[in-house]
């Protein structure tokens, strides 16, 4: 389900239609959301490994870009090395938002930014 809704960018409505058309089964939007939440919980150990890899890097590039989320401007924050990138969305752009990403407050290497 996360493959359809996140990688293929199908809406919940279209994902429901996909299940009905391909498998002849009706599935609720709540079930789709529950599957996505369960999958995200399984990713937590992986995300912790990515955070640790970034924290161990000597140089990390930090950046942010504005985007619309529910008709409001929010910020997609990134922490990147040549091997991995970690992203999070926050309503703010500055230090508070970067701290919420749980990388910069503990990072002791060289922090690069394009500004």
Image: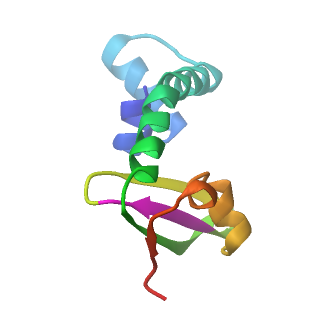
For image coordinates 46% across by 51% down, the residue present is: 55
Protein image colouring: rainbow
Asked if residue 91 shows in the view, the reply is no
Query: Which residue reaches farthest left?
Result: 82
The magenta stretch spans residue 80: yes
What residue sits 47% from the left and 45% below the top?
A: 51
58, above or below 19, in the image: below
Tell me which secondary structure the magenta stretch mostly adopts: strand
Residue range of the region highlighted in magenta in the rendering: 75-81
Residue 69, quarter of picture: bottom right
Q: Is residue 1 above or below residue 76?
A: above
Q: Residue furthest front?
A: 108
Q: Is residue 19 above or below residue 44?
A: above
Left or right side of 99 for 87: left
Residue 25 or residue 48, whichever sits in front: 48
What is the x, y in percent for residue 74? Answer: 65, 68
Query: In which quarter of the view is residue 5 placed?
Result: top left
x and y percentages locating residue 29 in the rendered image: 60, 26
Quadrant that contains the N terminus: top left
The spot of residue 23 in percent (x, y) is 35, 12
Q: Which of these two is toward me, 111 or 27?
A: 111
Task: Spot the residue most to the bottom.
Answer: 115
- Magenta stretch encompasses residue 58: no
Is any part of residue 111 visible from this angle? yes
Q: Position of residue 7 (x, y in %)?
A: 35, 42
Q: Residue drawn 49% across and 42% down?
A: 11
In this figure, what is the number of numbered marks? 0
Foreground pick, 5 / 64: 64
């Amino acid at each position: 389900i996360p493959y359809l809704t996140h990688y293929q960018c199908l809406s919940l409505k279209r994902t429901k239609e996909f299940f009905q058309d391909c498998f002849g089964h009706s599935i609720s939007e709540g079930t789709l959301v529950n599957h996505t939440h369960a999958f995200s919980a399984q990713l937590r150990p992986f995300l912790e490994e990515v955070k640790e890899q970034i924290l161990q890097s000597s140089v990390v590039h930090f950046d942010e870009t504005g985007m619309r989320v529910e008709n409001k401007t929010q910020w997609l924050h990134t922490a990147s090395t040549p091997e991995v990138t970690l992203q999070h969305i926050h309503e703010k752009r500055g230090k508070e938002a970067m701290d919420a990403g749980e990388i910069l407050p503990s990072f002791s290497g060289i922090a690069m930014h394009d500004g």
